[in-house]
Image (spheres, rainbow, N blue to C red):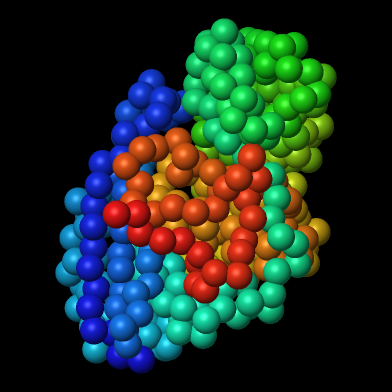
Amino acid sequence: MRIARVSVGRASMPRVDPSWRTATYAASAVEGLIVEVEADGLVGIGGTAAHPNSVTGDVLEAQLKGPVSNALVGTDALERTAIRERLRGAQLHRSAVSAVDLALNDLVGKRAGLPCHALWGGAVRPGGEVIRFVGVKSPTELVAAAGALMEEGFTHLKVKLGTGLAEDVERIRALRSDFGDRVWIAVDGNGAYRTDGAIELSRALEPYDVRLIEQPIDYDDLEGLARLTAASPIPIMADQSVRGVDSALEVCRRHAAHVVSIKAGQTGSLDECRRVAEMCLAFGIRVHVGGGGHPCVVDAAMAQVAVSVPGIEEECEVGEHLAVSGDITSGLIRNGRFEVTDAPGLGVSIVD
């Protein structure tokens, strides 16, 4: 199954919320990239996105059109592991490697006529609730944004925090006051707190039934995360701290989280996501499918992972492609839930 062609498309996808911001960056658009890999008349679709804090669209586009394409054309698409290891050895950004990995998984699934989850042993559940994000906002703006998402059928929300303890607590108090137990709430501090402040935040948020606090302190401070995890009455989730099996193992060994987040763009491949998930579950650490602003194909791929590993949390962040416009891939979500189908590969298509 020789790869005949690799094509790369790039588009600026405006955010539905042009005032989007977190504790570390603001962005009115997402730079999305789509990779198409063709072999034997079939086309596998992959994708990724630039991020203000880690990699630019120019870097990703140059890597995908240059060394990635050169490495793929003429090789056997069925040798996915060997291809991925060669790309990693070339010191390419893991988001570029991940985009190709998604396309190759999609291509192999289409060749087999099976969804990717079937190639990994089958789905253990059909889908789950979709968690949608709300950026840093005033309490009034937050309640309005949450209400709009709930009208669309979404009841699970992750709220970006990080402007100070009093303001952050007031945001969640207002949200719980307006919606009661109709909304599932998680929060993301994006590394804005120091350890003692994050402990204080967790205790202050405890009365508001917050289900988890994501990465409230520096990503590389595993000692601080371990101390926070031991003291927090709310589960602490490691996100950017987990970049693959090795870093996840350190989190597990140090008891530096109650939950870990897995993302294809962060680990570099769907296989690595699955390995991280199974290892962390063996340590008794919960596993959550994370997400972000990127093309739908990325969310679709993570949905395939979510349903194929027993023990992964039912609530998944596979809906943030809806937070941008101009996406050329589609398919996945209905009425606030995601469901995988029997469509071959990742189950997405290119929109004309």
Rendered position, 231 above or below 179: below
**101 relative to 175 in the view: left or right:** left
Q: Position of residue 207 (x, y in %)?
A: 82, 19
Q: Position of residue 300 (x, y in %)?
A: 52, 58
Depth order, front residue of 27/213 = 27
**289 relative to 226 in the view: left or right:** left
Q: Position of residue 40 (x, y in %)?
A: 32, 87
Q: Position of residue 325 (x, y in %)?
A: 36, 38
- For residue 337, say whether it is visible: yes
Depth order, front residue of 129/197 = 129
Depth order, front residue of 119/27 = 119
Q: Quadrant of the N terminus?
A: bottom left
Q: Locate residue 285: give its quadrant.
A: bottom right
Q: Locate residue 178: give its quadrant.
A: top right
Q: What residue is at 26 percent from the left and 41 percent from the top?
A: 12
Q: What residue is at 54 percent from the left and 43 percent from the top?
A: 319
Outermost residue toward the front? 352
Rendered position, 137 above or below 313: above
**61 relative to 51 in the view: left or right:** left
Rendered position, 179 above or below 256: above
- For residue 89, say whether it is visible: no
Depth order, front residue of 295/93 = 295
Q: What residue is at 46 percent from the left and 27 percent from the top?
A: 22
For the image, the number of numbered tags is: 0
Q: Quadrant of the C terminus?
A: bottom left
Q: What residue is at 31 percent from the left and 58 percent from the top?
A: 34
